Structure formats: structure tokens, C-alpha cells
Amino acid sequence: MAKKRIVTTTINGKETQFLCQPRQTLLEILRDDLALTGSKEGCSNGNCGACTVLCNGKAVNSCLILAVEAEGAEIETIEGVAPVDGLDSLQDAFLQQAALQCGICTPGFIMSAKALLQEQPDPSEEDIRFNLAGNLCRCTGYDKIVRAVQDAAAARQQV
Amino acid sequence: MASTSYKVIGTRPIRHDGTDKVTGRAQFGADIQLSGMLFGAILRSPHAHARIKSIDISQAESYPGVHAVVTGTDLPEQQQKVAHLGEGDVNLYHLSQNVLARQKVLYKGHAVAAVAADDIHIAQEATQLINVEYEVLPPVLDVLEAMQDEAPVLNDDVRTDSMAGEESKDPTNVAKHYFYEKGNIEKGFEAAHVVIEREYRTSTVHQGYIEPHNATALWNQDGQITIWTSTQGSFMVRQQMADLLKLPESRIKVVPMEIGGGFGGKISVYLQPVAALLSKKSGRPVKLVMDRASVFEATGPTPGSYIRVKMGADREGKLTAAEAYVAFEAGGFPGSPVVCACMCIFACYDVPHGRINGYDVCVNKPRSNAYRAPGSTHAAFAAESVVDEICERLEMDPVEFRLKNAAQEGTRRVDGVQFARIGMKETVEAIRDSEHWKSSLEGKYRGRGIASGFWFNVGLKSSVTAMLAADGTVSLLEGSTDIGGTRASLSMQLAETLGIAAEDIKPAVVDTDSVGYNDVTGGSRVTFSTGIAVHNAGLEMRRQLIERVANIWEVKVEDVQYEDGKVRGPGGKEFTFRELAAKIHATGEPITVKGTSGSENQAGAFGTHCVDVEVDPETGKVDVLRYTIAQDCGTAIHPAYVEGQMQGGAAQGIGWALNEEYVYDEHGAMRNATFLDYRIPTCCDLPMMDTIIVEVPDPQHPFGVRGVGEVPIAPPPAALVAAIYQAVGVRMRELPASPPRLLHQILQR
Amino acid sequence: MHDFDYEAPVDLDTALRFFAERNGSARVLAGGTDLIDQIRLGRYAPDLLVDIKKLPELNVLECQEGGLRLGAAVPCSEIYRNETVVSGYEALVDSCRIIGGIQVQNRASVGGNLCNSGPAADSPPSLIVLGARCVIASAQGQREVPAEEFCTGPGENVLQQDEVLIEIRFSSRPPRSGSHYRRFTPRNEMDIAVVGVGASVTLDETGERFVDARIALGAVAPTPLFAREASESLTGQPVNDETIARAAELAQQAARPIDDMRGTKEFRIHVTGVLTRRVLAAAIGRARGEEEGTRIGH
Ligand code: FES
Ligand code: FES
């Protein structure tokens, strides 16, 4: 077996070290070794977005990144989104709008939406749809998800 | 019934499990970690049809890091026996072979063996060391071809079972023949002014839930088995496990994890028995998770179909007769939902004379399974498309036609069932009165279509337990796994019954040892049937509270009233629910009640959809511009989740109509087993989806609930092809109406 | 997944040495959005992945006198986020905006898209019409190959075992030029081209005559295709429906598609003509500096 590596990253603001095989994906390490199971595996080939995390502030599919590639990177997962007291405005908006049914896609959508709102605080409906196209939801038909992101954008503008 | 009289029902509280789901804390099936846990992988057949000559697992067994290898022979042999799984029956002999193949593999992806190892990579490598010798047989992939005498036969034990009881002599692919008749079909067509007969084809499509199947099993040293899994029915998993492993149910506990979508596809077991066998052999807990390709290739999609429909109407647009021939691809083993298609196909209308023939046919594709209103979408596509042509010929408005012929209370379906109070007509009226229908559609290559659909909705059995806490909250234990917000809809019904706030109910979906029996989360039944159980529990809690108060006040029970979350007695005596809860421990025994349901049957639900499309006549691409869904929901408990069901169901129907299909090569290998090439809609493919909740309460439910989950998938394909016809003048009779197919028709025109 | 080693060198010489020494058992890891899945599926079984994202040469993105330099490891989203740098190279931006979803665009590079050499890849037609040159390095030295000659078959290209694509170079754009790439997909996003067409045009001062034109096709042959005759048919011709239709017809003749799960031959040939017309019209509009209104997926 190939030599294992020690990788040092920042995950949700905390410096984290882990040991991994080169063939292990970031998703695998997050879920199986670091017990951060909020990132989901829906396809493992970049087509569903359930595994979306932020890597240096940008949305990426953690199933298509090797864990060794995360050396020195800042990773943010769904577990790092909520402040200590309460929820992020995106999380609130998803609940208010009932933008989830089964909820398996929700962490990925929230991460993608977070990256979008960081870059475009006031996105149009088309911007939202374009930026969320890498996340599949089979339950909702997306209507309420798009509305939730619109609401969250509005809420963020207010503070 | 005025829903305004309700305090909780009809409001939109935050769902109880919401915070866990938006923070990533909710534990879905694949999220479980147990100490000493091994990871499993499955070896699957590369052939669509082959005889297994031998399996050699010795190399895999001795591979470093491997702890167990199992094959079909590790499962007990089964006799032909039918098990009832609530919604749909299953032949255990076939189920067992579907879980792990024995003599034959019947579709590419059919599970053949499994390995448990220290990590997933080792397990996968070891599966490659299993040596299977196959004798490859010719596959048959098309329903009509499989019905021919010279077609390769998949199952030696299958004979045609007709409803009259007689069986064919020789093995065949045609497992069942259903037949229904009403009135005199010949007379009916004689009375018709217009008769249209058309053939329709639909492709195999998948439920497409985002969460792959998973199962983690621990076969403990004391012989007790625990299964953690995402399922629509933990009690169905327990029952299937007991049957397949030939063990008493009491030895098996199923812990339902959060489930990432099911739509009918997560009722049958696939991985659960295999994980249990691997755990038994290794003495360790074992986790199995499917990859996406296996989900497509080896779990139950909904069948491809051939349907021929003939309908006649008189000059005034009154239907005189309707006839259908429906053949479904069951997949490798019998059991397609063709019978449901037969019962749904003309259910929207009052058909005086009808005849329906249905065939369940084996082909070398994965064993099909339920998918949201199973069979009804195929049926609606065919029947509603013929209706659209009849309207065109009669120059009749499709809304008017539907109002004229709509089934209503007392209408008898062709399969003999008589409708109770239903809301078909009301959904058509809702579309007629909608902004959407009243607006004019302008622009080239644009068209509008409408279509209706039906689903039975089932009742079945549920149990719940409710426990009063001293702080005035009530814990609710339920066994119906929550796929789309039923913790909320059940808590709201209990809250309404008790006159307290939805937030004061604490629902929990618990394991099979911790609550009474519950049938599947399926058939749009949970909010209805488990709702009745919850209501019964609430009534019992009220009764006990009244008794207690009568004791405290030393008055007669008849003099105490329970109202609005308050208990009132003679002389203006009064306790709020909270005040009373605080006194419970000091005044007697704890209050823990149960509620059950099972004798009620739902009346069925209808929906009518309206869609505007724009077609690119040079590429055949269809854009959905506007979509409106009207559906009879009885009483909407939590309107936001009702809307969500309507939108999500319609979205699946749109995907089915336009792009989703299994594409096979001539060897029977699926060519598109990824979310890239099996194209479910993304958020760029759909508009906002308008919903109109029609409320015709079902008198069999205390609050008038009707199931809402399934019916919205049925109308979209028919509505879309009607709209496409208006836009570019071609009638699509094959699904999906994908760009290559549609462009082909346009160029032929 | 197949077991492999991983190296992330920080200088080009070290990186090239790995390839010189490994006899084809090493593969380049750029964004990884294709490669990791391909290894998982067993299509490739490399013993070593060389991560090239830390090599400065492969991360250049700059526009100078001589034109645009694009490092082979620059992710797609960096390209469209630096719209001023790549202004004038609209077709390149069009391609980068539709490769996968945002998550993929944040990792996948144009260089990787090219080296993966899929017949339906979205960037090669744009590179071809923009006249890009592929800079290839090995321990022996460097060479340049025109984009249209880079791919040699499905998943195959001119790279030798010891070679790495390090940069893509574009000449500066002549005035009154415009380019566009568009593909046909059944879904509006997250899909793979059933047909892809890129075009670049340069017009004369009146804006009514083609000085030069280049058209390239994707997903209609084993490799991305430079439609030479279709391109040349426009040189010196007036801009009108007829000349455009003629070019579209020649593009259709150049297409050699197959029937597969994504589309039939009939469909692909027809749509090649349709898209060529539409793409030329859009490129002409851009060359004239006209406002554009596009819809997702169109
Ligand atoms: S699991 Fe990573 S994109 Fe689907
Ligand atoms: S809520 Fe189930 S997949 Fe999105």
C-alpha cells in the first residue's frame, strides 16, 4: 500500500491533522475519520453536490478531491456554518421556507448557497439557479430552495 | 369543513427535525459509526442474463484485511411463498435470489457475492478476486419481445397466473394477466361519435433519491441482530429479514435512520440481509453502502411499458367506452405495478363501458419496484393523451371535457371499485379558475397542456405512543419513518387534538422494539393513517386527563369538559394543559397512551396540472415556462409540506416526461448509470411551481386528510406532451420526449 | 480505488523528472474532477499522481502584448472571475462557465479538460477557434502544438509518457473580433455536450464582411474538430444568412458523429448545422460590440 500521509488543514476554523492514504478522498476522511458526516455522498463522481464543502472559500465537491490535496487548505463544512448561538440566516431560511423534505441534499445546498452569497450578496433568481445547478434535489422541485436563498440574501442585506 | 376552526392544522410551524437537518447533525443511514465496524462491498454480475456455473471465493477470503465473504448459498433456501409488505406483495423465493443470485443472474448488476474487510478499498479489491464462471445467455429487454413464445425465458418457475386462477403449463416471462371489465364494451364504442386508439411506450425510469441504499448490521454473539438502515418501513425490513434468514422476528431489531428519499424504492431489502450474513461470519458490525451505479443498475426502478388505449365519446363529449392493454416490464422477477396501472388508467372518468387487460412481464432489467403512484403515471400518460386527441377532434375545451366526464362520489371504476367522496372535479375547476389558465399564452412555438391523475392512497396499520411530561409537553413515539416532514404533520395533529402548540409535541421515530407495528411510509398513508393513530392517542390522553381532573375536583367525569387545551369543570373550575400536567405525578399514575389505526381506507386523490412550454423547433428542446398544480389534499395539515410534495412530485413527472430513461446496449448493459447521463432535472430546468391546494375533506379521517405524496407525479407527462403538441404540432407517444425523439418527429412532419 | 502514491512538487523540473522516470505509470493531477472518477472506475490505474497545482508555471493567467497566457492548472472559475484578463477571448469564458457545476469549475482546469481529450469536452472547440497553442514540456525541453492537433482520439492526445501540458497561449485578438461557444444539452446545466460548436470571427471596418473565421466542433467525431472548409468558406464573404447557412452546411459535412446514449447521428448532424448558425450569429454580434441577451442553456 502507498505510504500514508499526515495532512494538516484548517477545518471549520480549527487546525486539524489527519493521516490518510493518497487514494482517500476528502469526503471519505471527513465522514469516516473525522466524524463530520454532515457532508453526504450521493454519487461520488461530482454530479450531485451532496458532498459540497468550501475549500479556501470556494464550493467544491469533496468526493473529487483527494484528502492529501487539502494540505494547507481552509475547509468549511456544514458543521461549521451555524454560529454558537442559533443558526445562520441560510439555515433559518431553509427551515422557514420548508426548503427540505428528506434533507439529504440540504448540507450541500447550504454550502453552495453560502459560497454564492459571499460572492454575490444580491443574486437574481437566474444567478441562484445557475449557481445551484451542481446540487441535485429530488424531493422539492427546487422552488422552495430558490426562495430560501432569496430570503437569506435579503436577511443578510439587512444586518 | 372550514379549516379556519383549527388552531394548529393549516399553520406552518418549523419542523421538529429541522435544525438537525440544516446543521448536518441528522444521522442518515450511511452516517452510522460503530466500534469495530467493517466495510462491505458487493460483487455484481457483468451480464444481463447468464447461468452461474461456479463461484470461487478462496482467493478473496485469504486476501489480507478480509474478514468474511458470502454468496447466495449462505442464505437459507426458500419455497415459493408470498409475503405481504403492506403496499405490494413479494415472492420470497424471488426476493432471496434478488438479494444474492443462485443459479442465474437476471440483470446486469445482480448481486452475486459480498465481502467485508477493514476498509472499503480492501473490500472492493477483494471482490475482484472472486472468480465466477458464467454461461452467458441471450437477454431480452423489451416487454413485447419478452411476451413472444421464442423469447429467452428468465425464470423456470414462472407460469402465467391469470385472475381466473388457471396457469400456463410452460415456463414463461408473462407472470400475470389481469383482466377487468365493466358494462358492454362493444355497445359502448358503437355509441361513440369519435373513437381514438393509440399506442404508447415509456422507458424504465428510476426514483433517483439522492441517498444511496445502505445497511449496517450487527449479528450479536447472543444471536440478536440489529440493522441500522434507511428504509420506508422498518417493520417491513424486519419481516423480510426474518423470512429470508428464517428467523423469528423477535431476534431482529431494525433501527430506522434518517432516510434521504425513497419514493417507493426503499421498501424492498437489498443490502440488509447481506450485511447481516457478513456480520455473522465476521463477528463484527458491517456497513454496506451502494454506489450510484449500483443504485441505478440493481435497485428497483419503475418499469418500461407498452400501453394501447382506445376511447370513444359521443358528440357532446360524453365518454362512451374505454379499453386498455397494458404491459409492464417487471424486470428480472415478477411483480411490476401493472395492476395499479390497470386500476388507475380510467379512474379520473366516469366510464360506462370498459375493459382492461394487464400483463406483468419479466425482462433482463433490474427487478422493478414502486415509484410514487406506481403505474399511474404510465397510465395517465396514455389515457390523458387520448383524451387530448378526443378533445381536439370534438373541438372541445379540455377543461370542459374533464368536468363533463369527471369521476365523482358513487362512480364505479372499470375494476369495480366505487368511489367515496373525491375531488377530481374540484381540481379541474381550480385549474379553470387559475390565473395561469386564464392568462393568454403568446409567442411562437409555445403551447399549453393540461392533464389529470389519480392515486388510491392506502390506509394500512399504524401505532404510536404518547407520553405526557410534567412540563406540559408530550413525547410522541412513532414508527413511520419520516421522509418529508411527517414528524411535523403528526405532531400537529396531536397538538390539535390536545389543544396545545405543535412545538409542545416532541416526536421521535423509534426502532421496531420501541413502538407498535407500523406499515410502510408509502401509499401516501402516514399523515392519514398514522394521523388517525395519533388522533386516537390524543383522545385517549384527553380521556385520562378528564378522569384525573374529576378525581382531583371530586366531581363526575361527565361534568368535566376538555376544550381548547383546557379542562373545565363545574363552578368555573379550570386547568390549562400545562397546569394539569404539573399535577400528574402528584395525583396518580403517569399518563402514557397508545393509539392505533388500520381499518380506515382512503378515498383517493386527484390532481390536475397545467403547463406552458416553449419548444425549440430546431433542436427539440422543451423549456417549461410555467407550471401550476391543483390537487385535492383533503385537509392540508402543514401547507408548506403539502406544496412541497406537489412540487416535488411534479418535478419528477417532468423529468420522466422530458429526459429520464434507462439506455441499454444490445447486451443489456445500462449505458447511463450516472447522474450525469441519467438526467434528473436541475434547478435550471424548472420554473417556480405554483400550487393550488384544493380541500375536499376525506370523511374517514378526523381532520379530513387525504394523502398528498403520490398523485402529483401522474399528470405531468400527459400535460407536457399536450403542450408540446400545441407548440409544434407533433404528438409524442413515447417517453421521454427527449430532444432527439422530439426533433425526429418534428423533422418527419 | 486503485492504490497510488502522491507527489506535489513545487518546481517544474522535479515534476518533469517524475514523468521521465515512471514510464507511463504516473499521471498528472490537476483539478482531478475527471481523473479521480476515472481511477475509481478502473479506467486508469496509475502508481503515482503528480499534483501540478503548486507549479508556478502552470498557474499563470496574464494578458500581455503577445496575447493571453493560460497556465494548464488554472481552474475554470479563475478564468471567468478575471474577465478583464480574458476579455476578447469570449469563447474561452463561455466554455469555462459550462464545464460541470460551480463546484467542478472551481477545480477543473482548461488544461485538464484538454488533456482528458474527451470528444465532447467543452473547451477544445474554443481553444481551436481562438488559435491556441499548447505548450508541452518534458525533461528534454519544450514544444508547441496547435490546439486542433492536440487530441488524437477519444481519451488520446499527442502527449508522450514523459510530457506535460504546461500552458496554453493565445495570440492577441485583432480588432472587430468576436467569438462564442455553445453546446446542445438536454438539461440546461450539469450536462455533457451532445454537440458543441465554437466560432471566432473577425469583421472588416464596415462590420459587414468576414476578414477571417474559425469554426470548431465537439462531440461529433472521435476528437474535437476544426471545421476548416466551413471556416474558410467565410473568408472575404459578406455577413448574411446565405454565407452563414453555407458555412453551417459545410460544418455538418465535416461532422462524423455516432449514435450513442446521448444522441443519434441524425440529431447530431442536424444540430451541428443549427448551432453553427446560432454560434456564428452570436460571434458576429460580439465582433460588432452588440448587447447580448442569453438565457441559461440556450
Ligand atoms: S457525492 Fe460528490 S458530487 Fe455527488
Ligand atoms: S430534500 Fe430530499 S433530495 Fe433534496
Image (tube, rainbow, N blue to C red):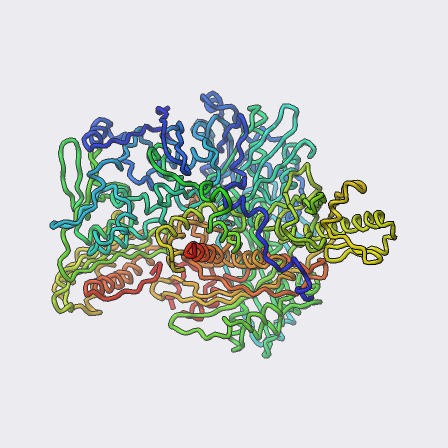
**In the picture shown, does residue B274 fall above or below B160?**
above
Q: Quadrant of the C terminus of chain C?
A: bottom left
Q: Is residue A12 left or right of residue C81?
A: right
Q: Which residue is depicted at the point 24% across and 65% down? A: C281
B573 or B714, nearer to the observer: B573
Q: Is residue B297 left or right of residue C62?
A: right
B184 or B530, nearer to the observer: B530
Decide if residue C165 is in sight here: yes
Decide if residue B331 is in sight here: no
**In the picture shown, does residue B190 fall above or below C297?**
below
Q: Which residue is depicted at the point 15% across and 59% down? A: C232
So how many labels did they put on this image? 0
**In the picture shown, does residue B8 fall above or below C146?**
below
**x and y percent of residue B497 in the render?**
71, 54
Q: Which residue is depicted at the point 65% across and 26% down? A: B223
**x and y percent of residue C157 in the render?**
23, 41
**x and y percent of residue B493 in the render?**
67, 54
B48 or C157, nearer to the observer: C157
**In the picture shown, does residue B645 fall above or below A34?**
below
**x and y percent of residue B743 in the render?**
37, 62
Q: Quadrant of the N terminus of chain C?
A: top left
B566 or B617, nearer to the observer: B566
Q: Is residue B510 left or right of residue B380?
A: right
